[in-house]
Image (cartoon, rainbow, N blue to C red):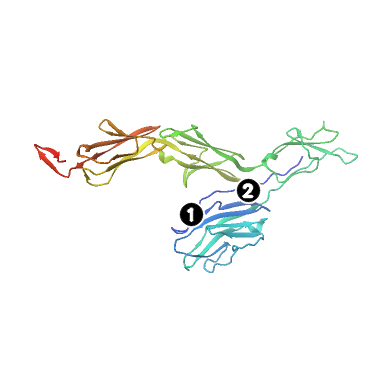
Amino acid sequence: VHFSQAPPSPCYKLFSLSAFGTEWSVKYKQTEICALKGSTVFINDSYTYPAGLEVKEEFWVKEPFDREQDTPVYCRPTKDSGRVQCYVDKQQHFSLKLINVTKEDEHDYRFRIKTNVANQKWLGDLVKITVTEREAAVLTCTTSCSLTDSPTFIWYKNGHPLSSSTNPLHLRPVSNEDAGSYMCAVRGYEHLPSPAQTLTVRYRPKNVSVSIRPSGEIVEGSPVTLTCSSDANPPVQNYNWFKEKTLLGKESTHIIPNISSEDSGEYKCKSSNEHGSKYSSVILNVMYPPKNVSVSITPSGEILEGSSVTLTCSSDANPPVQNYNWFKEKTLLGKESTHIIPNISFEDSGEYKCKSSNEHGSKYSSVILNVMCKLMFTLYNLKFCVL
């Protein structure tokens, strides 16, 4: 049995694209697209532009491109149903569609926006398209025996007969599922099969996933381990962990020994071998008791006897605070996030405490109320409020 090896499969990259200027922004789903010859490529994106401007022209270009003359234009939004199509809607979504791509479509593409102000125009970062062909693995069965008529061949994969009896056997396009041990035999001589030959298919990472240990709820202060796993041939050679755009590590596992609320967010693992790379991500939602608890007073400033005063307790917690308790000295006043004193008196002066609680703990915050009398006199160093 003779066969050819499989080429690498297409690679895809996710990305986040930076904007030109502080008020221009664009969101692309892909900046590098590796497409199969004959397939359809669809680039779907959106943009925003500075207020006060009016968009006059939108079109696609490909490098090399004259930025002064804005030529040549590759595709303008139309209702064309040809091989190259591009669209723009009123919500600033724009797209480029290439049907039946060929090697000639391998270029760097950009999106151009021109406004009513000559120097206010935007040229998007490039989107690179490469085109690849997936070849077939060809298995040929030969025999040195002299056969009197046209023989029928039987193919085996991993010891099991295949439905195909063609010779040569074409695996087109080849995939990792085709890997295995192959043998052939002439029908009627099944007891004399060929020596086994192994078909090895190389491919970029697939089925990439991230697991979290421990599983379940993540509480602040505990250790957390993220593990990246994937299927690839050859096995993944490089791992990269990211939080937003920050590189965290280059191992298959990323350990956070003492996790905090600031560690909440999306974590991405990039798995790579010589044939390409693929991402997988996971969201960490760190639970923690109330923190940054504070009490505000409304109205602010001087508090006069007879006025209405509202105390409001606020805090940062995950999950959000489920229970509030208000105290003056040891007396429980209420169980809401706000405590209202509708007709405050001089005797209401003093320290007020708010206790904020969730399932992970509680924390206090306090404030001093100093109620001013409309008329007050002092006798023997004691203050008296005249009602």
In the picture, measured across the screen, residue 379 lies left or right of residue 314, that is left
Q: Which mark is residue 10?
A: 2
x, y percent for residue 128 = 58, 55
For the residues labelled 2 and 1, the Cα–Cα distance comes to 25 Å
Residue at (70%, 48%) from the top-left corner? 135
Image quarter in which the N terminus is found: top right
- For the view shown, which residue lies furthest in the left direction? 380
x, y percent for residue 41 = 63, 54
x, y percent for residue 186 = 83, 36
- For the view shown, which residue lies furthest in the front direction? 387
Q: Is residue 374 above or below residue 115?
A: above
Q: Of 60 and 201, which appears nearest the observer? A: 60
State how many labels appear: 2
Residue at (57%, 52%) from the top-left corner? 32
Q: Of 108 and 263, which appears nearest the observer? A: 263
In the picture, measured across the screen, residue 217 lies left or right of residue 193, that is left
Amino acid tagged 1: Ser
Residue at (48%, 42%) from the top-left corner? 266
Which residue is identified by label 1? 18
Q: Is residue 169 above or below residue 52?
A: above
